[in-house]
Image: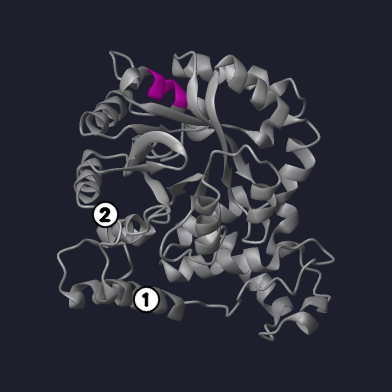
């Protein structure tokens, strides 16, 4: 295993971290509660035995069962060999007292008296403004830091690039952050700019979704042709992981592993990881991959946000992004699941009133009012 610096902390983290959002299940529901506990415990311990020392979970993963199973996996001496990360569900907080109540529940689930790395989960502008600040959750976290229930405090981020520095600058005691980052997300969410900004402030940056939920590991046929013609023995997953590890600002890369084969493949990739390992030819190949993916974009939305705010509350660029993802990755099922479960109904394409106000503002001259019914019809359809 290769190890890397963790921001300003005097500690080295394994290049590969174990993400516990997609543990093996008994019923095929990859996010459901029915975790195959013996298998999950076996692969978690295998990763630890091979040097993985950072394990990440969260209160809602597997409907709450992820923390429970991880607690069981860390019995028999494994807890002392790792640093544990979990997240406070900001979206479930309604009163200041919820912080201590939920943290106590998490400690019990995880069978531990402390959590080394504690994050505010899935921060965006709205949750920061409407929940974190009014409920004074930062004060609650500082109390938990003082009494040792948590060791270090950070946040995970899900919003656009403009929101990232707002949250980063609003609190001067952040020690680490977690961002979605991969070779297709260099300008989405925090992006390259957010990665570099956080690292420049001394924060450790943990990368999630390095394979875009597995989609970059299983590219559509038109993209796989590039890999086949490139001549490298690297797998698509290895290309994506090595591209991230090449960057010195990255502390560790989380992978949600549900099969022994995934664990072994990722361990092997991590053993070969190094900063500065990508040469010009490698970077050129990644650029060509990105360009080929972009050619598959159905709607030419650049996410400039000039169309916002929508009078009807529609998240126009967000709906276009989900729709485009279905075609970029040949993954209609994944896009529909995201639309159904992650896009609030009031923000979905169906809320469009066809007022056309946005069309006058769109630099790309996209006929938004014509697209929105098509987007909703496609994304709300039942999966076959």
- On the image, numbered disc 1 is attached to which residue? 287
Task: Kindly state the secondary structure of the residue where label 1 is placed.
Answer: helix
Q: Is residue 376 left or right of residue 338?
A: right
Indicate the quadrant where residue 280 lies.
bottom left
- Asked whether the beta carbons under mark 2 and mark 1 sit within 8 Å of each other, the answer is no
Q: Nearer the viewer, mark 2 or mark 1?
A: 2
Q: Is residue 137 left or right of residue 329?
A: right
In the depicted view, which residue is nearer to us: 275 or 47? 275
Task: Please state the horizontal and vertical placement of residue 174, each as a whole percent of the image.
Answer: 59, 39
Rendered-image quadrant of the N terminus: top left
In the depicted view, which residue is nearer to us: 250 or 353? 250
- Mark 1, Cα crowd under 10 Å, few <14 / some 14-19 / many 20+, is some
In the depicted view, which residue is nearer to us: 203 or 371? 203
Task: Please state the horizontal and vertical placement of residue 326, each as a whole percent of the image.
Answer: 48, 66
Task: Please state the horizontal and vertical placement of residue 225, each as a whole percent of the image.
Answer: 25, 76
Cα distance, mark 2 to mark 1? 20 Å
| In the depicted structure, whether residue 13 falls above or below residue 150 | below
Q: Which residues are magenta?
A: 67-71
- On the image, numbered disc 2 is attached to which residue? 274
Indicate the quadrant where residue 320 lies.
bottom right
Task: Kindly state the secondary structure of the residue where label 2 is placed.
Answer: loop
Rendered-image quadrant of the C terminus: bottom left
Q: Residue at x 65, y 26 (%)?
A: 141
Residue 374 is covered by the magenta coloring: no
Q: Is residue 312 left or right of residue 210?
A: right
Magenta span: helix, strand or loop, mainly? helix
Q: Residue at x 30, y 56 (%)?
A: 275
């Amino acid at each position: 295993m290769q190890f890397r610096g963790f921001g300003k902390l005097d500690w080295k983290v394994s290049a590969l971290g174990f993400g516990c959002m997609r543990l093996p299940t008994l019923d095929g529901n990859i996010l459901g509660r029915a975790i195959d506990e013996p298998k999950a415990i076996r692969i978690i311990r295998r990763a630890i035995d091979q040097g993985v020392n950072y394990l990440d979970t969260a209160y809602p993963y597997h409907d709450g069962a992820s923390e429970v199973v991880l607690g069981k996996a860390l019995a028999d001496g494994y807890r002392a060999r790792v640093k544990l990360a979990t997240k406070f569900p900001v979206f479930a907080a309604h009163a200041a007292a919820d912080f201590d109540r939920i943290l106590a529940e998490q400690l019990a689930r995880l069978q531990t008296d402390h959590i080394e790395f504690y994050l505010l989960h899935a921060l965006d502008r709205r949750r920061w403004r409407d929940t974190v600040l009014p409920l004074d959750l930062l004060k609650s976290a500082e109390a938990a830091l003082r009494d040792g229930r948590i060791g270090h405090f950070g946040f995970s981020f899900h919003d656009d690039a403009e929101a990232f520095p707002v949250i980063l600058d609003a609190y001067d005691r952040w020690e680490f952050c977690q961002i979605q980052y991969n070779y297709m997300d260099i300008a989405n969410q925090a992006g390259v700019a957010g990665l570099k900004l956080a690292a420049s402030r001394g924060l450790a940056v943990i990368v999630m979704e390095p394979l875009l939920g597995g989609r970059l590991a299983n590219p559509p046929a038109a993209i796989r042709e590039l890999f086949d013609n490139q001549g490298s023995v690297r797998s698509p997953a290895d290309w994506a992981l090595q591209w991230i590890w090449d960057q010195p600002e990255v502390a560790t890369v989380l992978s949600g592993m549900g099969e022994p084969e995934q664990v072994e493949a990722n361990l092997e990739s991590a053993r070969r990881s190094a900063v500065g390992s990508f040469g010009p030819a490698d970077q050129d190949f990644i650029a060509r991959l990105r360009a080929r993916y972009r050619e598959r974009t159905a709607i030419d939305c650049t996410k400039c946000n000039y169309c916002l705010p929508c009078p009807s509350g529609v998240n126009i660029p967000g709906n276009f992004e989900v729709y485009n993802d279905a075609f970029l990755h040949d993954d209609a099922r994944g896009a529909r699941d995201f639309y159904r479960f992650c896009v609030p109904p009031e923000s979905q394409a169906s809320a469009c009133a066809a007022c056309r106000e946005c069309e006058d503002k769109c630099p790309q001259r996209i006929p938004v009012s014509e697209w929105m019914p098509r987007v909703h019809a496609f994304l709300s359809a039942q999966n076959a």
